[in-house]
Image: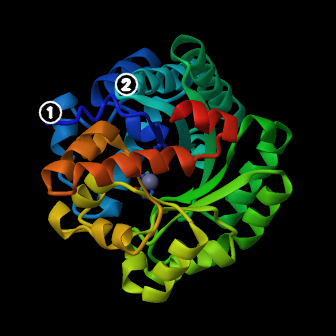
Amino acid sequence: TDPIDWRTLPKAELHLHLEGTLEPELAFALAERNGVTLPFADVDELRERFAFEDLQSFLDVYYACMVVLRTRDDFADLALAYLERAHVDGVRHVEAFFDPQVHAANGVPVDVVLDGLRAGFDEAERRWGITGGLILCFVRDLPVDSAAAVLEEVAPRAGELLGVGLDSAEVGYPPSLFQEVFARAAELGLRRVAHAGEEGPADYVWQALRLLGAERIDHGIRSVDDPELVRHLARERIPLTVCPLSNVRLRAVEDLRAHPLPALVEAGVVVTISSDDPAYFGGYVADNLAALAAAGIPDATLVDLAGHSIDASFASEARKAELH
Ligand code: HPA
Ligand code: ZN
């Protein structure tokens, strides 16, 4: 049989940081447009910094590049450039993260960020029929007060968001710190997801479920260390948005053949595949599927996981039926 073209398989992208789609070429173009200086001489020097050792060594470069994003148009251009690549990759629905606390620290108000990103998403829906929306992520290694403040600032525009998430440096910043902020988000009618169990322990996954009311867990791969948690995820059909190329680049796993994905799938957990920060981790979502296929995951399993990505999305049932 012919090899599967992973780009033609219908799928949703559920774990994607828009700032992590900033390709070095666009970063330098925006730096020039805005008169901002990046702490890297050129595109090649920036790419040389992509040999990451762990999550923090990536976050240092990721946050350094975010200073080039200043205007509404920058955010619109960033989103539209990503959504065009997603369209080419066969992605029909995108639920994407952004980090407004970091932009606020760079002097960019959350309204500017939201205006630009929404404009990019609206244009992509008109051009390519891509649906989805935005998930505001709280940055767990910034003060909880600043997370609460950004949430109140966007509260009047909660209808323009799908939900809230939790990202950035994990170990030492347990979900429990954000219990009140997530309760407030729920009050505003927002869906809730959280990064947990990427570098942090399985206990952080339990906390995200029990204390934050997370409906999906981003990464969640350390769940394999706790058999009771794995049974709970499977029984309750709580999806994990797994990002294989990210896990290898950030050394959360040694290589794809050592990845816990097959064990999770075998245990009946609803696993989806996403690209996390594709500009930094060497591939978009079809590349992640192709890499798993090359590492020995059966094609039929990967086709199932692509289907899960649609079912695990926050799209309406009617839209899910169209997406399949
Ligand atoms: N983990 C945590 N925070 C992040 C990531 C990630 O993979 N990407 C961007 N922020
Ligand atoms: Zn992530």
Ligand 1 closer than 8 Å to label 2 CB:
no
Q: Which residue is mark 2?
A: 85
* Residue 236 in the figure: left or right of residue 219: right
Which quadrant is home to the N terminus?
top left
Which kind of residue does numbered mark 2 sit on?
Arg
Residue 59, how many percent across, how many down? 38, 54
- Marks 1 and 2, how far apart in space? 24 Å
**Which residue is drawn at the image coordinates 50% and 26% (left, top)?**
79
SS of the residue under disc 2:
helix
**Which residue is drawn at the image coordinates 37% and 71% (left, top)?**
264
* Residue 57 in the figure: left or right of residue 118: left
Give neighbour class at mark 2: few <14, some 14-19, many 20+ (Cα, 10 Å): some
Q: Looking at the picture, does residue 204 appear above or below residue 106? A: below
Q: Which numbered tag is attached to residue 247?
A: none
Residue 192, how many percent across, how many down? 67, 58
**Which residue is drawn at the image coordinates 34% and 46% (left, top)?**
303
Residue 95, how many percent across, how many down? 56, 41
The tag earlier along the polypeptide, 1 or 2, is: 1
Give neighbour class at mark 1: few <14, some 14-19, many 20+ (Cα, 10 Å): few
Residue 2, how many percent across, how many down? 14, 33
Q: Looking at the picture, does residue 216 appear above or below residue 89? A: below
| Circles 1 and 2 in contact, beta carbons < 8 Å | no
Quarter of the rendered structure image containing ligand 1: bottom left
* Residue 98 in the figure: left or right of residue 64: right
Q: Which residue is mark 1?
A: 2
Which kind of residue does numbered mark 1 sit on?
Asp
Q: Looking at the picture, does residue 176 appear above or below residue 288? A: below
* Residue 46 in the figure: left or right of residue 29: left
